[in-house]
Amino acid sequence: MPYAIQTHHLTKAYNSFKAVDDLEIAVERGEIFGLLGPNGAGKTTTVSMLCTILKPSSGTATVSGFDLVREANKVRRSIGIVFQDPSIDDRLTARENLYMHANLYGVAASEQRERVDRILKLVELEDRADDLLRTYSGGMRRRLELGRGLLHYPKILFLDEPTVGLDPQTRDHIWKYIKELKEAHDITVVLTTHYMDEADRLSDRIAIMDHGRIVILDTPEKLKANLEGDVVTVRANNLEELSHLVSKWLGLNKTKVVDGALEITVPSAKAAMPRIMEIASQNNVYVESLVSRGPNLEDVFLHYTGRTIREDTTKELHGLAAAHRRTIR
Amino acid sequence: MTEIRALYTLILREIKRFLRDRARIVISFVQPLLWLVVFAAGFGARIAIPGIEYQQYLFPGIIGQTLLFTSMFMGVSVIWDKEFGFMKEVLVAPVSRFTIFLGKMFGDSTAAMLQGVIVFAFGFILGIPFDPLTLFAALPIMLLITFGLVSLGLIIASFIGSLENFGAVQTFVNLPLFFLSGALFPITGAGTPEWLRTAAMFNPLTYGIDALRSVILGSAWVPMNSLAVDIAVVGLFDLAMIVVGTWAFSRMGKK
């Protein structure tokens, strides 16, 4: 069976800087494909090319079997997009925005009313359907954009950072929608995000992207399992000493201090915890607490890129500013 | 068929947006009134145009001026759409760039025309001597003028990223087109510097306003060109702008 999306050496270069570098991915039909990476990793650039907004510098791709460049209009007809930044007309009502979308995508006039009503119901905006969007909250606008992306029955839905800047409750809500939509409409979803939990919760497969390249691609479960490591977090009166001692036992680069606690990566927490206690007491280090957890995507990301996704705080602020804009508008 | 429905929905959107922007409509009434009342009174006392009163002479010019300023300003809708992201929704739609451009152009032209018609009404209220029925002859000419100028505004806006820059470039384009169009003073006749006359010949608005005077002032006005020549020049300008506009919209976003 042909893939929903397949790229061949897809590249986007700005002068000498390669935003997307020789990308080779194949997205299966019907899966939620997560593109995870820090801001600036090339996720949005990739999606922009796949949506025909940006022209690739070199390489090509097929989307729903159509060539990205030669059959751009057919590609456009077969995809739905929810952009990272808002893309609705806030001087129009929700209903007007949906009708306009239906007309732009050639939905038959006889079907429009039913579909618009269905979408409004799906995203729970029936009550506010005839209010101007400028009176909507950020979460409501986001929901409308999600619904709009589905109005013309796309085969593939692109979600570019769908929950940036939304409050936890709304994010939860939107995640629920995405899962339901995928089940109900049997579509392929390409999701970009820099939120680990979002990628983990939603994706069937995750591609970790960094510096325009795919670092690793697998299911979230396998990505975590492949790390073969638990993390033990220790709070103690002398972290430096303990770190030094544990390093002698486990080797270098297995420990790091985070928020006043020592995080130790071990093959098995069960076996390691008594040993850590023993080392500590033998050397007069007083342990206050000892907690273990399985690896999460944050560890996976750290393992494959050598840094945490959150190191990019300025970019995070960028996202917040975008969210702020979304809320006021 | 799909393209026609897309065109319809894009035009409808522009008109709805315009009609919901009450403040802009009200403010736009003020400028033509100032020209027709204050400027006409002061300037008219110092200038003599054979055969007609200055206010009468100025009236078609101010219709042209209103069309010029409002049409060019309509380009702002492109800046807004880029800034607020809606442009992306349109650009990823399976609709030809020609249709997208035409949708914006026709929609914004309708809004600009509305203001041109309002100036017509002002002329009537102020008691400027002209036959109100000439409105029907003037409308197609006004429409032709508007198409080209709205297109020019859209083209400029498609190249510009910010509202501030758009304002600056607009003034830079608007004022020369206005002053060199014969809207305020005759650009033919004895004593007019040769360079001014030559420059005005390259201004499409010169022909548009000349045509407006021909139909509104009737036999009282001695036209520069025949109506056919005026209309042909404005029409060619429109066609050229639509071609360039479609190209400008095709390259938008595809950096």
Image: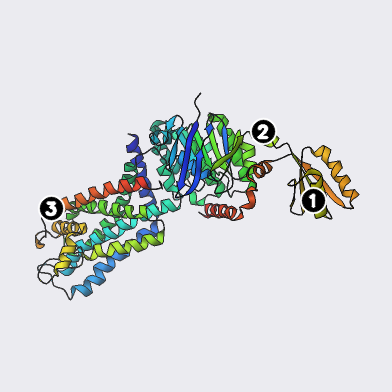
Q: Residues within 10 Å of mark 2 (few under 14, many from 20)?
A: few
Can residue A132 be seen in this snapshot? no
Q: Amino acid at mark 2?
A: Lys
**Mark 3 against mark 1, which lies toward the viewer?**
1
> Which mark is in front, 3 or 2?
2
Q: Are marks 3 and 1 on the same chain?
A: no
Q: Amino acid at mark 1?
A: Ser
Marks 2 and 1, how far apart in space? 29 Å
Identify the disc placed on residue A222. Answer: 2
Q: Amino acid at mark 3?
A: Val
Q: Specify whether A271 is left or right of A91.
A: right
Mark 3, residue position: B229
Q: Quadrant of residue A275?
A: top right
Q: Whole-percent x and y of residue B119?
A: 26, 60
As measured in the structure, the alpha-carbon distance from the residue carrying label 3 to the one carrying label 1 is 89 Å
* Residue on which the image places disc 1: A243
Coloring scheme of the render?
A: rainbow
